[in-house]
Each structure stands twice: as C-alpha cells, then as structure tokens.
Amino acid sequence: MDPADLQGVVAFVNTVEAGSFTGAGARLHVTKSTIGKSVAQLEQRLGVRLLNRTTRSLSPTSEGMSYYESCARALAEIEAGQALLASRRQVPSGKLRVDIPLAFGRRCVAPVLFDISNRFPDLMIEISFNDRRVDLIEEGIDLAVRMGDLDDSSSLAARRIYAQRSAICASPAYLERHGRPQSIEDLARHSVIGYGREGVVRPLAIRDSAGRLAAFVPKARLVLGHGERGVQHRLAG
C-alpha cells in the first residue's frame, strides 16, 4: 500500500462519526475546509464517492459505509497497539537478558534482579553469570554489569552504579612464615593469587609510599579465571 492512500482516512472516519465536516474538524482541531479537502482527495484517489452531501447534512454512501467500517476497525487496532506500548513504558514487561559477573553478580546484583522480578510479574529476566567480555549485540544481551575501566566504545551506553574498594589479604599463618610486605617491591617477592583470562594477569591498583596509584602486575603462582574461586580460595586459606 502506498502511504499516500492513508491520507484522509482519519478525516473520513471522524466525519462519519461526527456527522459533519465541522464536527470532525472540532475533533481533530483543524478547520472544516481542511477536513472537506482531505475527504474529497481520498474519494478522488479511490475513485468512489464515500459521502452524500447536501446543504443540510452528510451521510455515507453504501460503499462509504463499508469503507468506514473497515477503516474504523483498523484505526481501533492502531490505537490499541499504541495504548499497549504506552502501558509497557509505565510498567516493565517483556524479556530482559542480563549478564553479570560471577562473584559480584551472585552476591550483589542478583538479589536486586530478584526483587525487580517480584515487583514486576510481567517482566521475565534471564540472568547469565560470567566474567568474560561479551558482545551485547552478537549475543543478544540487553544489559551487562562489569567491573573495572570501560574501553572506549561509541556503541555502548554505560552508567556507573557502584564503587568497590579492594584490598590485598593474607592469612596470619602465611605472614608468620613469609613476613609482611612493606612496599610494592616487597610484594613482588610474595606468592600471589592472580586474576586473569587467556594468559593475561590483570594488574592490581596499589598506592605507593607517596600515595600515588600505581599498576602492579603480580607474578602469580595461581591465576584464576573468575572472582568466585578467588574469594573461596582466600576464605579457605
């Protein structure tokens, strides 16, 4: 269908329902002559007289009544669709795919998502847990929560939602055997559990003796691919 074929349909439907060009113009907030021209152009495109016009009244022809009923149903469907979209903007619904880190996600993000799911029963949330970098578009993910610096990307909309402080920890037994490091140089000589993926160990952000933030890449004897195992190992050891 040519989009031009739809021009005048709303004016025609409102004219039939209002019984006059004047009434239709009042409904649509335009002049009587604008409505009359729209309906006349519609009749010309269709090649059919839709309205019987007299000096005192307007009435649909038999073809006009059939056309009106079809158009009225179509416009009602459009209005229903718009109302549905408006309601969904007010109350979350549909499907939301969220990808979150394993340790942080399980402890901090998942409880929030569970609460949202309870509050909005029309919303279905699909949660995946991993620490790897994901391609949101390629993998069909609507929202990803990640920790650390965000690489420049014009295709992502990002918002900071949390600030996490980290610390380097050791068990009392380990410190008793190996001593307590006093500097970054001392730390380089200690056994460290590192976090990394694909052969790359993620650096630690540590402040030096002058208070400046420095990146320290540990010579880790044990490298773990996600935070959950790191937390468990620290708690166990």
Image (cartoon, helix red, strand yellow):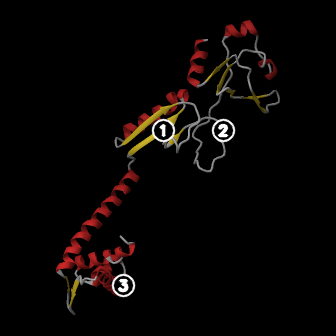
Query: Mark 1 vs mark 2: which is more N-terminal?
Result: 1
Which amino acid, mark 1?
Val
The residue under the point 80% across, 28% down is 208
Choose top left, top right, bottom left or bottom right for residue 68: bottom left
Q: Is residue 209 above or below residue 233?
A: below
Given residues 68 and 117, the one toward you in this image is: 68
Residue 14 position, x and y percent, is 27, 76
Q: Which residue is mark 3?
A: 34
Q: Which image quadrant for residue 161?
A: top right
From the viewer's side, name the closer residue of 110 and 13. Answer: 13
In this rendering, position of residue 29 left or right of residue 221 = left
Q: Is residue 43 above or below residue 114?
A: below
Residue 46 horizontal/vertical position (percent): 29, 80
Name the residue at the bottom extreme. Answer: 55
Residue at the (40%, 47%) spot, across then down = 92
Q: Taking 183 as reference, is 3 above or below it?
A: below
Q: Which tag, 3 or 1, sits closer to the chain's start?
A: 3
Callout 1: 10 Å neighbours few (<14), some, many (20+)?
some
Q: Going 59% across and 49% down the picture, which residue do you hit?
A: 155
The residue wearing badge 1 is: 98
The answer to whether the residue labelled 3 contacts the one labelled 1, judged by CB atoms less than 8 Å apart, is: no
Identify the mark at residue 149; answer none if there is no mark: 2
